[in-house]
Amino acid sequence: MIKHDDEGAMGLILNRPTDNTVTEVWKMVGDEDIECPQPIFFGGPVTGPLVALHRLKGAAEAEVLPGIYFAAHKDKLAKLVRQTSKPFRFFTGYAGWAEGQLESELQAGGWLTSKVNKKLIFQPADDLWEQVTRTIGEAILNKAVKPKHVPADPSLN
C-alpha cells in the first residue's frame, strides 16, 4: 500500500513481473541507454506512469515505510537506474480504490492482511505469494492452536 487516506487508496502488486526489462522500457522513456536486466512489474490494473519502490533516499518522493521509498518523476527514476548499490523495483500500472472502497472490501472480508515484511519487497517474486500467505496462515493458526504444538512444517505430520 503506497497511500491510504480519506480520498482513497493506491497500492502496487509486488509479485507479477512482466516480460519487459528495465533496459527495454528505459529506451522508451530515458535519455540514455542503461543495462538493467531486472523485470518491470505489473503494479495493477489502473494505467499509470512508470513508478518505483526503492531504498535510495536521494531519489525519494515519498517514504512509504521506514527506508522504503516511492518515486514516479523521471529525474528520480533516472537516479535509480544509474546506481547499483540500492535495490529498486519498477512498476507499470497500479491498484487503486475510490474513497471508502477499500474499507468496504476489508469489512466484507475480501482481503487477508498482514504487517509488511520489508525484506520481502525486493525478493524474487516467484515465491512471494507463498511466503506472505504462509505468514497470514500461521498468524490465524497461532490464534486457534497453542503454537508449541504446531511443528515448523505441519505438512510433515
Image (cartoon, rainbow, N blue to C red):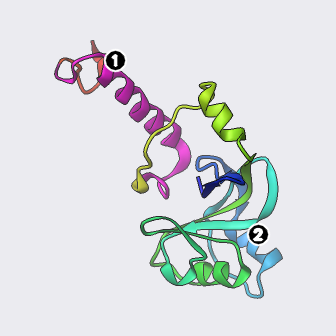
Q: Which residue is mark 2?
A: 25
**In the depicted structure, whether residue 143 falls above or below residue 106:** above
The quadrant where residue 59 appears: bottom right
Where is residue 56? Give x, y as percent.
49, 77
Q: Residues within 10 Å of mark 2 (few under 14, many from 20)?
A: some
The quadrant where residue 106 appears: top right
From the viewer's side, name the closer residue of 112 and 91: 112
How far apart in space, not on screen, are marks 1 and 2 (Cα)? 42 Å
Question: Which residue does the image show at 42% across and 56% down from the upper left?
Answer: 118
Q: Secondary structure at mark 2?
A: helix
Q: Which residues are magenta?
A: 120-148
Under mark 2, the amino acid is Val
Where is residue 74? Give x, y as percent.
73, 80
From the viewer's side, name the closer residue of 123 and 149: 149
Q: Is residue 140 left or right of residue 124?
A: left
From the viewer's side, name the closer residue of 102 and 95: 102
**Is 127 inside the magenta-drawn segment?**
yes
**Is 151 inside the magenta-drawn segment?**
no
Residue at the front extreme?
6
Q: Which residue is mark 1?
A: 155
**In the depicted structure, whether residue 75 falls above or below residue 69:** below
Under mark 1, the amino acid is Ser
**In the depicted structure, whether residue 50 falls above or below residue 114:** below
